[in-house]
């Protein structure tokens, strides 16, 4: 078995893992990302557009939608039949 070393090991290269990897690298850490699939991006590959509620970019656009409001809008739209977890 090959031994590898890094400051940070990220398991899964979906949007969350990749964002964590970039953040760690930007802060000077050596990073290794392990992805079980043959492509990175996870479910983000099916997404049609970024939806970062309360994100830096949203604030830059002066859009005041909160996570709680977005959650309620989404659940109302889907008649509360989704499993929110
Ligand atoms: C059909 C669809 C459309 C969507 N459209 C949008 C949209 O338009 N806008 C939007 O903002 N969001 C959208 N989303 C939601 C968005 O894609 C998810 O919120 C986002 O991908 C979640 O990211 P994640 O990194 O948490 O998980 P995931 O994207 O699920 O990534 C998990 C990763 O972990 C990997 N993995 C799992 N187990 C292991 C393991 N044991 N070892 C290594 N790797 C592993 C998987 O292969 C995958 O790459 C959509 C989701 C779907 C399903």
Image (cartoon, rainbow, N blue to C red):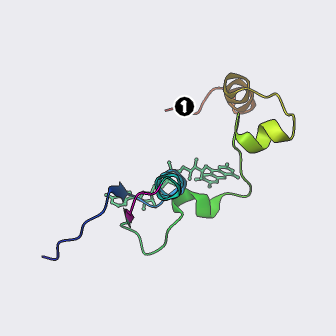
**Residue at x-position 85% and y-position 33%:** 63
Q: Residues within 10 Å of mark 1 (few under 14, many from 20)?
A: few
The magenta segment is 28-32
For the residue pair 75 and 21, the one nearer the viewer reads as 21
**Residue at x-position 64% and y-position 26%:** 80
Q: Is residue 10 magenta?
A: no
- Tell me how many marks there are: 1
The x, y position of residue 39, in whole percent, is 48, 73
For the residue pair 36 and 75, the one nearer the viewer reads as 36
Instruction: Tell whether 33 sits left or right of 6.
Output: right
Instruction: Tell whether 81 sits left or right of 62.
Output: left
Q: Secondary structure at mark 1?
A: loop
**Residue at x-position 52% and y-position 52%:** 23
The x, y position of residue 74, in whole percent, is 71, 32
The x, y position of residue 42, in whole percent, is 51, 60
Could you say which quadrant of the image residue 66 lies in?
top right
Instruction: Tell whether 35 sits left or right of 22.
Output: left
For the residue pair 53 and 8, the one nearer the viewer reads as 8
Q: Main secondary structure of the magenta part?
A: loop
Task: Identify the residue under disc 1.
Answer: 84
The x, y position of residue 46, in whole percent, is 63, 61
């Amino acid at each position: 078995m090959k031994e590898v070393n890094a400051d940070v090991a990220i398991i899964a290269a979906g949007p969350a893992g990749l964002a964590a990897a970039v953040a760690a690298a930007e802060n000077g850490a050596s990073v290794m990302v392990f992805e079980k699939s043959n492509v990175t991006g996870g479910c983000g590959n099916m997404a049609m557009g970024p939806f970062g509620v309360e994100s830096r970019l949203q604030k830059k656009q002066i859009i005041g939608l909160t996570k709680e409001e977005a959650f309620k809008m989404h659940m109302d739209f889907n008649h509360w039949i989704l499993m929110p977890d």
